[in-house]
Amino acid sequence: MTANKLHKIILTSAILLVLFRLLIFGLLTLFLGASQELARYFVFLPVLIVMSFYCCTLKKIQTYQERLFSILITVTIFVGVISILALKIFYSEIDLLSIIIDMSRYNLFLIFPLLLLRLPLNKDDYRGILDTVAFVVLSVGGLLMFFEAFGYFLEVITFEQTYNFIGAEAYKLRETVHRPLGLLGDCSSSGILLSACTVYYFVQKISLPNSRSLSYNKIKYSWTPIIIGFFATILAAALMPILIMLIVMLYATFKYTKVNHIVAYILFLTVFTFLVLRYAPQNPYEYLMGYIENIPDVASIYLPSLSWAEFPFFEYNKNLEMNAGEFHFFNIMVTYGFLPFIPWMLFIISPLAKILRLIPVWYQDRAPMMLCLVFLLAILHYSGLERWGSNYVYILALCMLFVSNGEERRLKQTNL
């Protein structure tokens, strides 16, 4: 076994451990009496593994794209460290450890991709890791969602039992009544992860039908994990992940296939009708008209309760009335000010350069682009992007987008 293959196996296993940590430590607690809180210390395992590999093997960052990517990451980490020190100096009442913990999911987390770029891995390697992670998330995590949802329906298990099993209170996870918590202990975040992996596998399946001659396509993508992930996302019962999954899958169908579009329209309208009938608490027409007639009130729920006069560019905000509305993705930025997070947000939205075709796009970019698009759209409400485990999946997709290999230079640019 080569060192490169060993790196991929260990890194893949570490990311899967982070994604399934609540289930794993729930079982360990149940059978061995271990502490559920130990799971929180394993979220950095992939970072530590990459750091250890970094000390052994290095590669030079060669392309202009990779250099620019690396510079942006370095600047973001530097801004994060400086902001932590500045916040502690100017706001002595803040606990230093609390700031570091909050920033670890944002600016400081980018230590992982910074070192990952310096390992001797190429686009094929990142694709192989992401393929495996997505397959396990859909096959195992999706079936777990089925088990939990039907367990509630058949009254075999209760929500409280699941909540206690994963130790949700220890991690301060959001309480949701009778909705599957899934891998990440939250129906919305788990739904986004399943939605992203389903879209990724779906695009790989439909957009590479004649690519057997290309060396990077060595995995046969089947419909089974796609179907499991599709219905598991619906069973998560979080409306935003379902709508995002449908919209992105519909877009990918039109963009990357030559099938009769009427089939996609029928599928979309059928599922959309089901969702309206399932989630509308009253007559669907009255429900829709209620939104239309009360647009100002509905908009006020989603719009941040901020004004430019009090906009937190760089300050510690303790005022709970000042919030980011339903854009929960920005809560931590409202707390500490947006300025330190601007480089991080630029890094996070960098896939838009590919999605909008501002820089060259290749066959291999299609699936990771759509995966990133799912996470970016989720920012509109409950985001799963900054959750431990999901952030590793997102970084793997970014590496696939911005790291090239020799074969890519020989391929013609694909007109998507």
Image: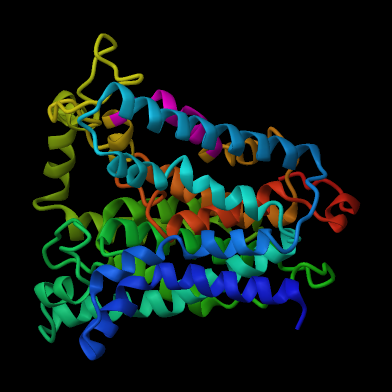
Q: How many marks?
A: 0
Q: Residue at x 38, y 75 (%)?
A: 142
Q: Which of the pair 69/269 is nearer the observer?
A: 69
Side of 152 where 270 appears, left or right: right
Instruction: Classify the position of the C terminus by image quarter.
Output: top right
Whether residue 263 is visible, yes or no, is: no
Q: Which of the two residues, 115 or 292, is positioned nearer the viewer here?
A: 115
Q: Is 137 contained in the magenta span?
A: no
Viewer-proximal residue among 143 and 344: 344
Quadrant that contains the N terminus: bottom right
**Which one is in front, 351 or 90?**
90
Prevailing secondary structure class for the magenta stretch in the rendered image: helix
Q: Residue at x 17, y 28 (%)?
A: 318
Asked if residue 288 is positioned above or below residue 256 in the image, the reply reads above
Residue 156 visible in rendering: yes
- Residue 345 inside the magenta-drawn segment: yes
Q: Which residues are magenta?
A: 336-347
Q: Residue most toward the top?
A: 309
Which percent across, then down, holds residue 188? 29, 56
Q: Is residue 299 above or below residue 208?
A: above
Q: Identify the residue at image location x=41%, y=80%.
A: 140
